[in-house]
Amino acid sequence: MKLNRRKLLWGGATTVALGASGYKLFRGFEDGAEDSQEIPQQLQRAGLDVHVHAMGVGTGNSGCWMSDAMKRSIQARTGLWTLRLSIDQPDLDQAYIGYLIRRIHTAGFLKQVVLLAQDYVYNEQGERAPLRTPFYTPNDYVARLARDHAEFLFGASIHPYRRDALDELDRVAGHGAVLVKWIPNVQAIRLNDPRCRPFYRCLAQHKIALLPHVGDEQAMVVAGQEYGDPRTLAAPLEEGVTVIAAHAASLGYRDGRSNFDLLAEMFPKWPNLYADTSALTLITRWRMLLRLAERTGLYARLVHGSDFPLPPASTVFIGRMPMRRWWNAWKRENPLRRDFEIKQGLGLPEAIYLRGYQVLAPRISAARA
Ligand SMILES: [Zn+2]
């Protein structure tokens, strides 16, 4: 191919544009001065994000743990890079929390987030299986953070096959846990396993909600995608548990039907079933957010979640919303705010940012009493 000056110029410009948008796919520019006046009045520092992960490698005696495979993974390294953190820094766990608290403040629409612990994988015999566990975040660590920082509510994680599962549930209830988080696909939890029933009854008694990952999981090594079958949510629902299906079951198929469709048809039967909007701005799930925005009949069941620290990809939404709105999302460094601006741009209702408080209200008032 003969290269002339014009071709070179075009080639250079294209490379720069692709590089910039590739970079911007995951990380925004530094936020300027706060512009919370752009946030609707009723949402100013009023919203709740029900899905924010606490993670770490154990610095500062956090008790957190991460497998070597996960530490070395592209996901962890790029994820930390988008937060301007590094896997090798000696204060990583504390810097992560510091970063998060600052972004909650500058997000403008958030009052609090539910910070999530993450239990080990347990085998069928109820024994801990650290070799199959990608990361572990202790309940005590998250409970302590929730006690020390008004920005956090305590999201516990307890594998139901643990022999001490019910005792641990009573214990975290005493520390003010508002929900229990599971990633069944990773933690190997069958939601319709009869062994889970006593755990569900105990959850209902404490008015603690369940936040299970539903649908397929692509970010981590899984024990099996069948654990994400939305239909198995009937078991906790039958026991009177309030269930928030994470990611609105947005990936995968079961028996030839999309997990999302299987979940959607359960709402009329179960008034205590909700879905969170977490991870839907990610590069792997963004098309689902477009579909969800069109399903106005489901709006009343949606609860806002981000899935922080996973990075919202604003670039892919170009042309899907008014240009001014897209730019407003694209320029954001703060991933919590970028996620919010994308959802606002697609017309998701403002009520979802307040709904987390409504859904968790029975527990929040019980914990206060
Ligand atoms: Zn998550």
Image (cartoon, rainbow, N blue to C red):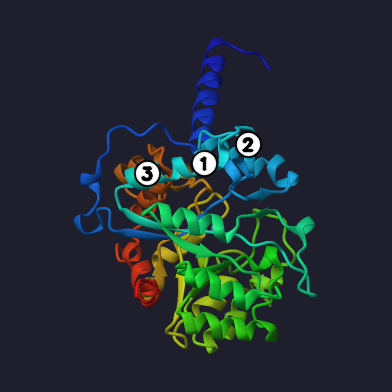
CB atoms of marks 2 and 1 within 8 Å: no
Residue 148 is left or right of residue 259, and the answer is left
Q: Is residue 2 above or below residue 340?
A: above
User: Which residue is disc 1 drawn over?
Assistant: 94
**Measured from the top left, where is residue 252 in percent x and y?**
63, 66
Q: Give how far across and how far down residue 144 sits, in percent.
A: 49, 55
Q: Identity of the amino acid at label 1?
A: Gln
Q: Residue at x 54, y 71 (%)?
A: 171
Q: In terms of sequence position, does the residue under pointer 1 or pointer 3 come before the other?
A: 1
Question: From the image, which quarter does the C terminus lie in?
Answer: bottom left
Q: CA distance from mark 2 to mark 1?
A: 12 Å
Residue 227 lies left or right of residue 100; in this view the side is right
Closer to the eye: label 2 or 1: 1
Circle 3 residue: 329
Q: Quadrant of residue 196?
A: bottom right
Q: Is residue 195 above or below residue 340?
A: below
CB contact under 8 Å: marks 1 and 3: no
Q: Secondary structure at mark 1?
A: helix
Confirm or reject: label 1 Cβ below 8 Å from ligand 1.
Answer: no
- Whether residue 207 appears in this view of the structure is yes
Looking at the figure, which quarter contains the N terminus?
A: top right
Residue 61 locus on image (x, y percent) = 60, 45
Say which residue label 2 marks: 87
Q: Is residue 359 left or right of residue 157?
A: left
Query: Sequence-wise, which precedes: disc 2 or disc 1?
Result: 2
58 and 306: which one is in front? 58
Of the pair 2 and 201, the residue shown nearer to us: 201
**What is the CA distance from the residue labelled 2 to the residue labelled 3?**
27 Å
- What residue do we see at 41% from left, 48% from top? 336
- The image position of residue 346, as x and y in percent, is 36, 56
Of marks 1 and 3, the one in the foreground: 1
